[in-house]
Image: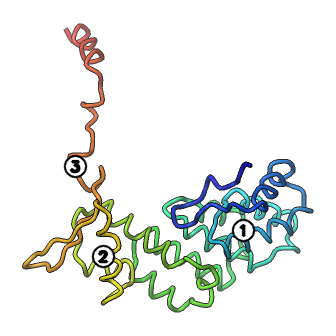
Amino acid sequence: MGREMANSTPNQKQQPSAMSYTVEQLVAVNPYNPDILPDLENYVNEQVSSQTYSLSANLCLLRLYQFEPDRMSTQIVSRILIKALMAMPAPDFSLCLFLIPERVQMEEEFKTLIVLSHYLETARFSQFWNEAARSRHIVDAVPGFEQAVQAYAVHVLSLTFERVPRSVLAEAINVEGLSLDKFIDHHVSNPDWAIEKSQDKGQLIILPRNEFNHLELKKSTVDSVPLEHIARIFPILG
């Protein structure tokens, strides 16, 4: 049985229910049929309750709202945008926002979500968590939001740092004290994480190596050019 879950993130598991297959069929066969609008709305709520995610189904619903503006549910649209935020660093939020009328975007709830998106895109995590704390009535509607943002914050840090001070990690994921210890211990169980003591910086968290935070893993352009291609250049230069 096929499932419309290619866009799932690690924090949003695939949905095994028959409903996803039904929605797949509806979207694939006639995505502009307004009669499927209630099914797509129900599917958004299903994604929220089961912590699953389908970008294509949500985009289909937003496109239908463009043709049926009187039937638009701002609650459903808000949940779609929150799920899109949880999918970062994928550009899902911008894709969804493009399909939402400007008059709707100007409502306070959506202005808040746009601000939250901007803070995440610019890695201003302290401002993000402060704004999110003031907007609990919005973001708490979708389970797993905080954990998804924390995973994104760690991803962003790992693009820049191989070693990060404990205080920097704490600010990025908005966790302190014993909760931070548990968070670190959980990830240190992964061989790619480690803890290092530093006299001047205190505890340092060693993040997984990648081509962005570790130069040795980044292949140079010269290394990627086959030798036979270089040999062909010599006669031309001569």
Does dot 1 land on a helix, a strand or a loop? Answer: loop
Determine which residue is flagged by label 2: 185
- Whole-angstrom CA distance, mark 1 to mark 3, is 41 Å
Label 2 neighbour load within 10 Å: few <14, some 14-19, many 20+: some
Q: Residue at x 43, y 74 (%)?
A: 150
Specify whether 83 is left or right of 235: right
Q: How is the image coloured?
A: rainbow
Residue denoted by label 3 = 215
State the residue lying farthest toward the left. 199
> How many badges with numbers are in the image?
3
- State left or right for residue 134 relative to residue 236: right
Residue at 70 percent across and 56 percent down: it is 56
Give the CA distance from mark 3 to mark 2.
27 Å
Instruction: Name the kind of residue labelled 2 in the image.
Output: Asp
| Residue at screen point 30% across, 49% down | 211
Label 1 belongs to which residue? 100
Q: Amino acid at mark 1?
A: Ile
Q: Specify the amino acid type for callout 3.
A: Leu
> Is label 3 in contact with label 2 (beta carbons under 8 Å)?
no
